[in-house]
Amino acid sequence: MYAVVQTGGKQYRVAAGDKLEVERLTAEPGESVVLDEVLLVNKDGQLTVGNPKVEGAQVVAEVLAQKRGEKLIVWKMKRRKGYRRKKGHRQELTVLRVKEIKA
């Protein structure tokens, strides 16, 4: 059984026991989080596609950690003008472990 869930503007294919990193959620490590924007559920080969969401479907996950992602360097430059800008960015992430999919 698996589901496609949307959070933080991105979509993830998840199954029970999966570990994934999503955009920062407001929850402490050890807490449970319910992701209710479920777009698709596959249960024993029977596919249920939402329009846009599957009614009554939920994904329950446990928060393992709050962390920051790898540093990305943003480099801007205009040739022959002496214009150069270097900026770094680290995304705030939440690490989840999927407990169950309720469909």
Image: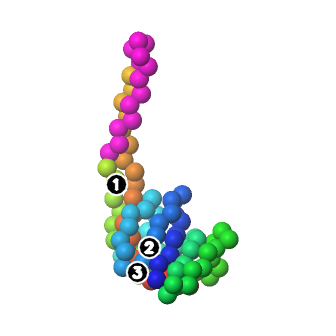
Which percent across, then down, holds residue 61? 43, 76
- Closer-to-camera residue (44/30): 44
Q: Which residue is mark 3?
A: 16
Q: In which quadrant of the rendered image does the C terminus lie?
A: bottom right
| Furthest residue toward left | 70
* Relative depth, front residue between 67 and 81: 81
Task: State the residue at coordinates (32%, 45%).
Answer: 71
Span shown in magenta: 71-83
How far apart are the two marked residues, 3 and 1, measured between alpha carbons?
24 Å
**Would residue 81 be visible to someone looking at this image?**
yes
Q: Which residue occupies the extreme bottom position in the image? A: 44
Residue 14's label in the rendered image is 2
The amino acid type, in three-letter code, at marker 3 is: Ala
Where residue 64 sits: x, y (%)?
Answer: 34, 71
Q: Label 3: how many residues lie within 10 Å, few (<14), some (14-19) or many (20+)?
A: some
For image coordinates 39% across by 35% down, the residue present is 74
Q: Is 75 included in the stretch rendered in magenta?
A: yes
Label located before the other in sequence (3 or 1): 3
Q: Secondary structure at mark 3?
A: loop
Where on the picture, by quarter, is residue 56?
A: bottom right
- Would you name the residue on which mark 1 appears? 68
